[in-house]
């Protein structure tokens, strides 16, 4: 019985990791995702968690074929049914549309300092509560439907480097206060139908207000 259970878990791990169709590496070269460098960490009593990369030592950048992986591709983990926590590596610069879309059990995400763009990547994550950004985050762009329909996401720290916030990145999110006052935004939009939102603190660089 134990052997059968282990085989089932291993097959499930492989199925999850095979959802990464491809990643975009340096010089816009497309390379296959190195699924052997990813692993669902399972411990007795612990929740499923994916850490990229996984190894004895965390590397400065996640590499495939000697080239740094700069993006997590479109719909890489779309509709994943077991993922609860994600930690992404330094060196990553972009997360594409639907990369973690509709991961209904995803609760927490830790993003790297190097990340510069998020585009529609966590939409319809109904259990998502926490998104961790380092104090020196280099995030510049949040667009598309990044945190749409994330009703449990009550807070987000907008980094000082943020320059673009457009589309509908927080539509129907559970966010209660939005404070992008430290950012470099010249236009703000994206908080439609946030029924719990009580206040938005705008930056002095603001020139236009879009559809909130």
Image: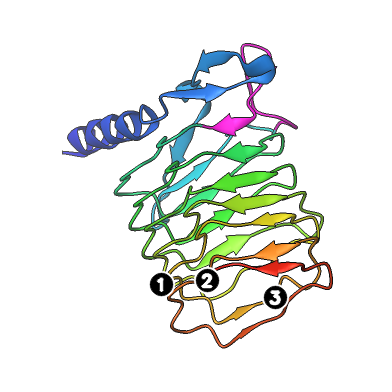
Looking at the picture, how far across and down is residue 159, in whole percent?
75, 61
Q: Which residue is mark 3?
A: 179
Q: Quadrant of the N terminus?
A: top left
Rendered position, 207 above or below 56: below
Q: Which residue is mark 2?
A: 191
Residue at image x 58%, y 73%? 155
Comparing labels 1 and 3, the label whose residue is closer to the camera: 3
Q: Is residue 123 left or right of residue 158?
A: left
Q: Name the mark on residue 199.
A: none
Crowd band around label 2 with a 10 angstrom C-alpha radius: few (<14), some (14–19), many (20+) = many
**Mark 1 element type:** loop
User: What is the CA distance from the residue labelled 2 to the residue labelled 1?
Assistant: 12 Å
Q: Which residue is mark 1?
A: 151
Determine whether label 2 and label 1 are within 8 Å by CB. no
| Rendering quarter of residue 193 | bottom left
Q: Is residue 112 left or right of residue 17?
A: right
Looking at the picture, how far across and down is residue 42, in whole percent?
41, 45
Residue at image x 39%, y 48%? 101
Comparing labels 2 and 3, the label whose residue is closer to the camera: 2
Comparing labels 2 and 1, the label whose residue is closer to the camera: 2
Q: Residue furthest bottom?
A: 198
Question: Would you say residue 151 sits in the magenta stretch?
Answer: no
Question: Would you say residue 71 sits in the magenta stretch?
Answer: yes
Q: Quadrant of the C terminus?
A: bottom right
- Magenta residues, start to end: 59-72
Looking at the picture, how far across and down is residue 23, in whole percent?
52, 24
Q: Residue furthest front?
A: 208
**Mark 2 element type:** loop
Q: Is residue 193 left or right of residue 8?
A: right
């Amino acid at each position: 019985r134990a052997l059968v259970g282990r085989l089932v878990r291993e097959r499930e791990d492989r199925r999850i990791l095979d959802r990464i169709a491809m990643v975009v590496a340096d010089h816009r070269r497309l390379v296959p995702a190195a699924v052997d460098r990813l692993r669902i960490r399972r411990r007795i009593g612990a929740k499923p968690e994916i850490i990229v990369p996984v190894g004895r030592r965390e590397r400065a950048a996640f590499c495939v074929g000697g080239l740094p992986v700069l993006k997590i591709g479109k719909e890489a983990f779309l509709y994943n049914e077991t993922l609860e926590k994600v930690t992404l590596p330094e060196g990553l610069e972009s997360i594409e549309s639907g990369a973690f879309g509709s991961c209904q059990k995803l609760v927490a995400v830790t993003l790297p300092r190097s990340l510069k763009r998020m585009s529609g990547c966590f939409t319809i994550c109904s259990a998502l509560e926490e998104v961790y950004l380092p104090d020196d985050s280099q995030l510049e762009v949040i667009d598309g439907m990044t945190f749409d329909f994330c009703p449990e996401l009550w807070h987000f720290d907008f980094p000082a480097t943020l320059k673009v916030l457009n589309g509908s990145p927080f539509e129907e999110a559970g966010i209660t206060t939005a404070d992008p006052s430290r950012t470099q935004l010249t236009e703000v939009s994206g908080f439609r139908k946030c029924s719990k939102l009580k206040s938005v603190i705008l930056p002095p660089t603001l020139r236009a207000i879009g559809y909130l």
